[in-house]
Amino acid sequence: MTNTKHSPIGAHVPVSGGLATKGLAYAAQIEAETVQVFVGNPRGWAVTDGDPAEDAALRERTDLPNFIHAPYLINLGTPDDAVGDKSLSALEHALRRGAEIGAGGVVVHTGSAVRGGRDEGLARVRARLLPLLERLGESVPPVLLEPMAGQGQVLCATVDDLVDYLKALDDHPRAQVCLDTAHAFAAGHDISTRAGMRAMLDRFGEVVGAERLRLIHANDSKAACGSNKDRHENIGAGRIGAEAFAELFVHPVSAGVPLTLETPGPAEPHAKDVQTLKRLRAEVTEG
């Protein structure tokens, strides 16, 4: 056995019809070991209260770690104060909902400066997010910062970009990381081989620290390396290819970190992707 740490494998699951009722049934159907959910409209600002019974049913599944993905509209680096205020409110709501369902973290995109440059954008992230992290503390799950594909004036795409982003937050312990393999590939990390994946993870360990990595979005990519295009593909059907994902299960930075798929669905291709990753995990950890 190469590494004894067990990385749970799962997917983002649909929850229309009940966070637990629908989400847990879907998880069982695809044989997921971990899940990611939305707790509201991912493309809107409206927030909704949870159903206590549904929340409890999900929270009580301690064998199935869960994570929340915050709404896509959130941009903590925006120069638009109204959007910034809505972003903070939406993120705080997701964090509080995370506490209610026992989430291991709340994923949020690292955002864009929109205009004016990266330094100004990072200053706005600091002014907005740092007080929220301080105020909420350990009453809510950590924020999992997700670097983006590198499009436009995004504030964080490569592993090295995380250094300045975290520095803007005074390396706050509640600011942790979710790496998306498709985003990393599009941002210029050639992770299409195990050696390439290893090099990216080595760099993460050197400049960010393994203790910051709490979740991995395991996605293949329709788009080319360095394209700055966010185009997810099923595992093995894209330009990264399946075999490179095996490194995630044994590298000291990523071994034991949960993997959630955000690949094209519905359940049948998701189940196939889960099984592909489980096969790779078995090959490198049990061989």
Image: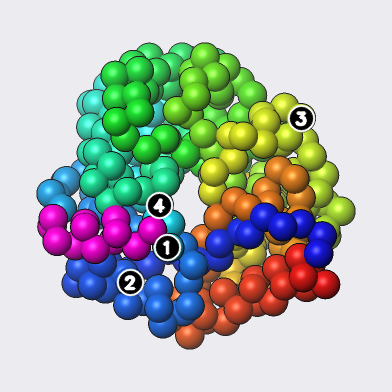
Q: Earlier in the sequence, mark 1 or mark 3?
A: 1
Viewer-nearest of labels 1 and 3? Answer: 1
The residue segment tinted magenta is 51-62
Using residue 43 as the reference point, say whether residue 203 is left or right of it: right
Residue 56 is inside the magenta segment: yes
Q: Earlier in the sequence, mark 3 or mark 2?
A: 2
> Which is more toward the observer, 13 or 114?
13
- The overriding secondary structure of the stretch rendered in magenta is helix
Q: Report crowding for label 1: few under 14, some 14 to 19, many 20 or more residues within 10 A (C-alpha).
A: some
**Residue at mark 2:** 24
**Residue at mark 1:** 64
Task: Tell me the quarter of the picture where residue 86 sits.
Answer: top left
Q: Could you give the CA–CA distance between mark 3 and mark 2, rounded to whole angstroms?
A: 37 Å
Pinpoint residue 172: horizontal percent, then vertical percent: 49, 20
**Residue at mark 3:** 206
Q: SS of the residue at dot 2?
A: helix
Q: SS of the residue at dot 4?
A: strand
Residue 76 is inside the magenta segment: no
* Contact? badges 2 and 1 (CB < 8 Å): yes
Q: Could you give the CA–CA distance between mark 2 and mark 1, rounded to whole angstroms?
A: 9 Å
**Residue at mark 4:** 67
User: Can residue 116 be seen from the camera position used here?
Assistant: no
Which amino acid type is marked by label 1? Leu
Which amino acid type is marked by label 3? Glu
Using residue 4 as the reference point, say whether residue 270 is left or right of it: left
Which amino acid type is marked by label 4? Phe
Q: Could you give the CA–CA distance between mark 4 and mark 3, rounded to whole angstroms?
A: 26 Å
Task: Tell me the quarter of the picture where residue 206 sits.
Answer: top right
Q: Residue furthest right?
A: 195
Q: Earlier in the sequence, mark 2 or mark 1?
A: 2
